[in-house]
Image (cartoon, rainbow, N blue to C red):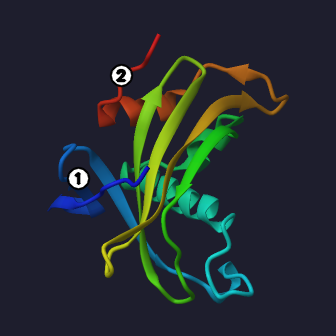
Amino acid sequence: MRRKFEVKQELPDDFVIEAGTGHRWHREGFRVLYADTDKAGVVYHANYLKYFEIGRAGFVRATGRSYKEVEALGLFHPIVDLRMQFESHADYDDLLSVYARPRSLAPVKFSYEYVVRNDQLGRILVHGYTIHCCIDKERRVLPVDEVTRAIFEDYGVIRER
């Protein structure tokens, strides 16, 4: 299903409000590297997961925190599920934006939502989400850490039961 995405309002620190839903997203811009393309000259599909990470990391940095804080606690956030819906393609050197926002928070997992877009063309390329859990160095699943919980709660995402 095609997704619509239009920026209604620009906010400080690269945050935007989406028209229609009123959701607040963080926008991170970047250019497509030649190394990200395949023989056909378009972005190889697996690289969009890397673009999701660019958006997620940019969002976390924009909150004044970092994933390094989580790692300093001896915790990690592997992806346990994801969805990517492809709508269009990007070429080498295209200027893209990845929009990211917290989606949900539960006791032992949380998720982010993403839209990768060519803003110059007004075209969505990919949208989707990632679901993460919180683990320690021994790979034991633990409750979501305090840093991540604070980011989500500050953003207005209430923990599900």
Q: Position of residue 2 (x, y in %)?
A: 40, 55
Q: Residue at x 59, y 36 (%)?
A: 131
Q: Position of residue 33 (x, y in %)?
A: 60, 84
Amino acid at pointer 1: Glu
Q: Extreme right residue here?
A: 138
Q: Which residue is situated farthest in the top direction here?
A: 161
At a point 34% along the width and 56% down the height, the residue shown is 26
Q: Position of residue 120 (x, y in %)?
A: 31, 81
Q: Is residue 156 above or below residue 79?
A: above
Q: Above or below — where is 151 with respect to 34?
A: above
- Quarter location, residue 37: bottom right
Number of the label disc, if any, that sits on residue 158: 2
Residue 62 placement, left or right of 17: right
* Residue at the disc numbered 1: 18
> Local crowd at mark 1 within 10 Å, few (<14), some, or many (≥20)?
some
Q: Is residue 21 left or right of residue 141?
A: left
Query: In terms of depth relative to the viewer, which is nearer, 75 or 116?
Result: 116
- The local crowd at label 2, few if under 14, some if 14 to 19, many if 20 or more residues have their Cα within 10 Å, is some
Height in image: 3 above or below 79? Answer: below
Which circle, 2 or 1, is nearer the viewer?
A: 1
Q: Nearer the viewer, residue 93 or 57?
A: 93
Could you tell which of marks 2 and 1 lies nearer the N-terminus? 1
Q: Secondary structure at mark 2?
A: loop
The answer to whether any part of residue 11 appears in the image is no
Q: CA gap, disc 2 to disc 1? A: 20 Å
Q: Position of residue 42 (x, y in %)?
A: 62, 82
User: Could you say which quadrant of the image residue 122 lies in?
Assistant: bottom left
Residue occupying the point 50% across, 49% down: 128
Judge by depth and name the residue closer to the eye, 25 or 94: 94
Residue type beneath disc 2: Ile
Residue 98 sits in which quadrant? bottom left
